Amino acid sequence: MAELPIRTHKRIDAPGLDGLRWRVWLEDDVPLIVDVPESQQVIAGLSAAQLHERLPAALQRYASGRLLHDVPVIDQVLDWGSPIVLQAEHFD
């Protein structure tokens, strides 16, 4: 299975957003913006710190159903919309 080459992630302020936002850097300094709506945080039953800790694995789960094996991962990610919105199920 193809995986996202996640280097690091950082929570960022997003005034007016009903939820939490991160900037995730992939290899080659490719940034992604990732949101978790407040409603999904409540469903997941996780604190902001727990979401932060589990974000890389949740993003991998999100990507697992979208990544093709025969196309470079970075090329595929550049075609995804922004922000990427994760649901509670991605944090299971």
Image: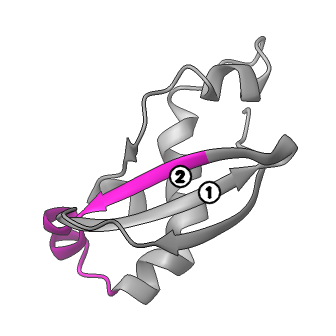
> Percent x, y for residue 44?
25, 72
Give above or below for 48 relative to 89.
below
Q: Is residue 38 magenta?
A: yes
Q: Which residue is mark 1?
A: 24
Reading the chain from its start, which is encountered first: label 1 or label 2? 1
Q: Residues within 10 Å of mark 1 (few under 14, many from 20)?
A: many
Residue at image location 16% in from the left, 75% down from the top:
42
Q: Which residue is mark 2?
A: 59
Distance from disc 1 to disc 2, alpha carbons, whole Å, reads 10 Å
> Percent x, y for residue 49?
44, 88
Q: Relative to 70, is 11 on the left or the right?
A: left
Q: Relative to 39, is 55 on the left or the right?
A: right
The answer to the question of whether label 1 and label 2 lie on touching residues, with beta carbons closer than 8 A, is yes
Placement of the C terminus among the 4 image quadrants: bottom left
Give above or below for 70 relative to 67.
above
Residue stretch in magenta: 32-47
Q: Nearer the viewer, residue 34 or 50?
A: 34
Residue type pointed to by label 2: Leu
Q: Residues within 10 Å of mark 2 (few under 14, many from 20)?
A: many
Q: Relative to 2, is 81 on the left or the right?
A: left
Residue type pointed to by label 1: Val
Placement of the N terminus among the 4 image quadrants: top right
Label total for image: 2
Q: Secondary structure at mark 2?
A: helix
Q: Secondary structure at mark 1?
A: strand
Residue at image location 55% in from the left, 38% down from the top:
63
Residue at image location 18% in from the left, 68% down from the top:
38
- Taking the view exactly as shown, the residue that stands out farthest to the right is 28
> Percent x, y for residue 39?
13, 65
Query: Can residue 41 be seen from the camera position used here?
Result: yes
Residue at image location 65% in from the left, 21% down from the top:
76
Q: Which quadrant holds residue 84?
A: top left
